[in-house]
Image (cartoon, helix red, strand yellow):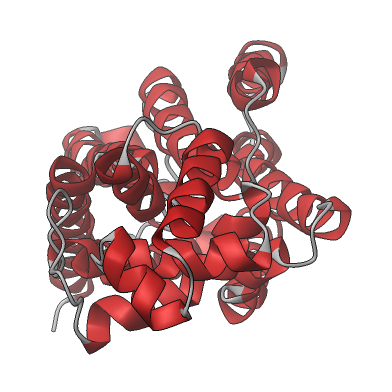
Amino acid sequence: MDSSLFLFYYSIVMQVCAILTAASCLAAYLVSRNKVQLYSFVGFFMYYIDCMLVFRDGYVMASQTAAAHEGFYIGDPVSSIVFGCAFLSAFWLVVCEYVEQDSKVMRYAPAVLFIVASLTVTLLMPQSYFHMFVFYSLREVFMAWMLIYSAYRYVTMHHQQQHVRLKRFKRFYVALWFLVLATVAENVVFLLIANPGIVVVDLPFFPERNFAENLLALTCAFIAFRTSLKYLSMRHIDPPKEGGLRVEAFIEQNLVAYAASRRLSPRETEILRLILLGKDNQNIATELSLAPGTVKVHVHHILQKTQMANRQKLTQDYWNYV
């Protein structure tokens, strides 16, 4: 297969994966109103547009004789900054949701710094392969910041139980570190080490098409798609009364971390699990061998600590805690 044709189909695959993941996240958000799903939708949709820039750059490169003899090509830096910042910032907000970071400064300062740094490199550095390397490596700096801050929050969390929620992603975390470093290494090889003269004309290197970065995006897409399917497989507003094995497994997976974040006692946590399974006070009292009045008091305390108005809101709040 011709190399340019291979890159054409490769780019199509990346775009399809990005837009399908964005669609699944949007559907999951409409069901659950979970902010993680909303931010994931924005992130993958912006990444889809960022992938589309490759087609534009390829067209421009092919239409310009001078550029056609150049092994490397950089497109419109403004578009790259805008869409790069958009999808990176969306994924940073996902991280903030997971580590329970509510500070507006922490949520939006990295995006501002990314834009300032990118504009500084664009305006002040002379055009060169090193300039391209620094410009596109700012994305990896942003990604590394997300990973470093996630580790910091994991270590400094007050409740050990909250670690359960993040520990599920330890393999994913290690894989992301590997792929971020691989992305930097690929840019080093193609932009700083390789001789432009030996690069085949019909196989140009676009930093937007960094294969390691694309693999990183596909890894994130897999996790996001799998999570969205969990939401879509359950009813949000009116979950099944007795749950079923899938719902019960999902509840058990996050119950300890949720209870720790809301400072629930062990008994309140036990009652919360039964509430999430759709049991009323009488059934809970029978199952736990408690007086109905005692159960009513515990439920009242749970609603107070979670700041929810009723059981329905409490259930929705739990499904939002992923």
Residue 253 picture location, percent across and down: 47, 76
Residue 292 picture location, percent across and down: 40, 60
Q: Is residue 21 left or right of residue 238?
A: right
Instruction: Please tell me which residue lies in front, 272 or 166.
Output: 272
Question: Above or below — where is 280 with respect to 300?
Answer: below
The image quadrant that residue 166 belongs to is bottom right
Question: Above or below — where is 109 with respect to 42?
Answer: above
Q: Quadrant of the N terminus?
A: bottom left
Residue 118 picture location, percent across and down: 61, 22
- Residue at 69% across / 61% down in the picture? 162
Instruction: Please tell me which residue lies in front, 61 or 98.
Output: 98
Tell me how many marks there are. 0
Q: Quadrant of the C terminus?
A: bottom left
Say if residue 195 shows up in the picture: no
- Residue at 43% across / 36% down in the picture? 90
Say if residue 205 shows up in the picture: yes
Instruction: Please tell me which residue lies in front, 221 or 257.
Output: 257
- Residue at 23% across / 38% down in the picture? 49
- Residue at 65% across / 41% down in the picture? 142
Residue 80 picture location, percent across and down: 41, 29
